[in-house]
Structures are given as structure tokens and as C-alpha cells.
Amino acid sequence: MSKKVKIANLIIGGGEKIAIQSMSTFKIAQVDKAVEECLRLKDAGLDIMRYSVTDEQDAKAFALVKRKVDIPLVADIHFDYKLALASIDGGADKIRINPGNIGSEEKVSQVAQALKSAKIPVRVGSNSGSIEKEFLQKYGRNEVALGESALKKVSQLEKYGVNDIVISVKSSDVRLAVKAYEYVASKTDYPLHLGVTEAGREYHGTIKNAIGIGSLLLKGIGDTLRVSLSADPMREVIAGKAILSALDLAGDSVKIIACPTCGRCAWDCMGFAEKVEKRVEFIKKPLKIAVMGCVVNGPGEASDADLGVAGGKDGCVIFVKGKIVKKVAEKDLEKEFFEEIDRCLQ
């Protein structure tokens, strides 16, 4: 089991809930816009938000945003160690850096001392495009090179006494990412931040991330995740929540099972499943809902659902734990079923 790391009011690792992250597509210096986005994404299930820091204005904005939001805010810094120091001073709850690209040992040392003084964690790691040359030459472009490159960055901070560390080893190649995370998990107990980087647009990107992240979580590997998509960050959060829900790792979300339908289906099962999905999308409560195509198999196949519906040519039946409790006409179904959902949520 991984060690625990505290990020503001959140703990990751050590068997704690898998935290969902996303990254903003605009500057945190746009304070009002950042606050609105954080609040909106938190309602959808976001646990941690990350921002690129490109100047002093960004670094100082963390304190302003934190006055109005209560999720951890992460500063993402490349090349300029002074921005890392400014972000720590500005109130960032965690920073993400690459010790190899922020300069001399003295600069790394200064960042390390600032991290320890502020008592905030740091994420380091590597991706398939930033593997250290020494490991590429020694191992080739594989999981060992990717993993060892990340572990070298860890050691660069450990020697200065930094031990609140989170590691990532991302790749756009799903197989390589999975193998690299498995390799690192076998070498260290630091929490791991999972993700398939540069995964693409929403549809294909979600599939790639679900395969990569999901296969790792099934093996007990991973403590936080980001579903990286070329899409609105909201879609990343929703996809992350869906992955956790599918693995029964999201204790505070609604799970929907829906019949793929066949020739026996005599009502708009697919359309109603979509309506139910939208109705419960942002609800944070453990609840299993079934939308089934016919009464022949529906209640039996979904007998473990807290609430379900199955249709037929003469109307629909609403059932609870496999037991039919009500028969309704299809035209009245939305009103009746949504009322039943509300009762389940009380």
C-alpha cells in the first residue's frame, strides 16, 4: 500500500479515496473565472485542480482563488525555479515540477527547502517524451527507462529531505504507461498519479484512459488520476468519475446499468436511459439504477439495483431490488420514475 500524502484538506494514498484531478485551460490569474470553474467542477466530482504558472501574476493568484474554493490547487511549473518559489509563497497547495529542467543543484535545493518550510507536497515524474538520455541509452524506450527516469527525479528531491512526493509516469502509449506504473509501484511506496497523456479527443481519449487507468486500479495501483482529454475539463472529471464508478471505487456516485436492447424492446429504452443519466449526473450518493428493455428479463437481471424500470408494449414497470412495485404508462414514466429517484435520495 502506498504512503499517505496530505494536500491541503485532502489525503491521497494509503487506501484513501482515489482523487480525481483536472487541469485548467486558462491562467489562474483570471481569478473570477478560476473560482467559477473550480466550484462547477467540484460539484461534478473534482478533488484537485491544477494550473500552469507562467508568471508572477499566476503565482500570486493562488491565494486569491483559495479564499473562495476549498479544493487543493496545484501549481505546474517548468524551467523557472523562481516561479516554483513564488507559487509556494502564493499559497499553492502542491507543486508539479521537473527537477531536471529548473536549473542547478542550488536552485533545486531552494525549491526543496521551500517545500519543506511550507509543508506541501510535490509531484514529479516523466513521460515518454522526457525520458532521461542515460536511461534511453541503457534500456531503450520502455517501461524501465520511463520508470527509472521518474525515480531519478524523486531521488533529486529526497536528498534534500523532501518526502511528500507523488509520482507519475505517463505515456500516450497505453501499454507503456501501464507497464511503467507497474514498474514504479514495485520500486516505491509513494502515491501514484495515473493517466494516459495526450490521449486525444473525448471519445477515443476516454477509452484509452479507461483501459490504462482502469487496468491499474484493478491491480490496486494508483491513488489519484487525471483523464487527459482534448476537451472541456468538465469532461475529464465526468470520465474520471465514470471510471471509478465502473470499478466500484466511487462510493458517492450513482451507477446506471442499461440494457443494450433487442427485438423484444417495445419502448424507447435508450432515450430514457439518457434522460436518467442526465438527471443523476452530478448526484453524490451510492445508488444503482437500472433501465432495462423488457419485463421478460429486466427485473431479474437487475435484481441488485436499488431502483429500476423495464418496459413493454403495455407500459413499464418500476422495480426495487428486483421486486415490481408499480406499473405505469410510458407517457407517465419520466415523472413517476424521477419521483422514485428523489425518494431514494432522501
Image (tube, rainbow, N blue to C red):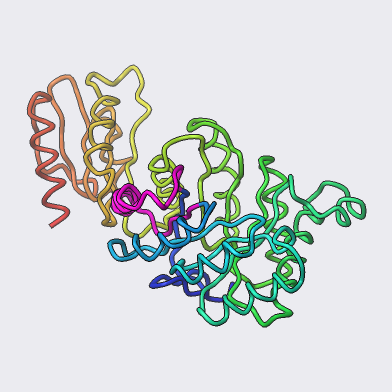
Residue 135: name its quadrant: bottom right
Instruction: Decide whether residue 42 is among the magenta residues.
Output: yes
Give percent across and percent down for residue 16. 46, 70
Foreground pick, 263 / 131 = 131
Q: Is residue 274 visible?
A: yes
- Count numbered badges in the picture: 0
Q: Is residue 1 visible?
A: no
Furthest residue in direction right, as rendered = 138
**Position of residue 236 in the picture relative to residue 252 (left or right):** right
Furthest residue in direction front, as rendered = 56
Residue sitting at x 89%, y 53%: 139
Foreground pick, 74 / 318 = 74
Instruction: Decide whether residue 34 is among the magenta residues.
Output: yes
Residue sitting at x 28%, y 40%: 290
Foreground pick, 227 / 130 = 130
Give percent across and percent down for residue 308. 22, 41
73 vs 142: above or below: below
**Position of residue 12 in the picture relative to residue 321 (left or right):** right
Give percent across and percent down for residue 149. 77, 59
Foreground pick, 261 / 149 = 149
Residue sitting at x 48%, y 61%: 59
Residue 297: name its quadrant: top left
**Position of residue 184 in the picture relative to residue 283 (left or right):** right
Residue sitting at x 76%, y 54%: 146
**Position of residue 103 in the picture relative to residue 304 (left or right):** right
Give percent across and percent down for residue 158. 70, 77
The residues colored magenta run 24-51
Quadrant in the picture for the N terminus: bottom right
Residue 335: name its quadrant: top left
Quadrant in the picture for the C terminus: bottom left
293 vs 31: above or below: above
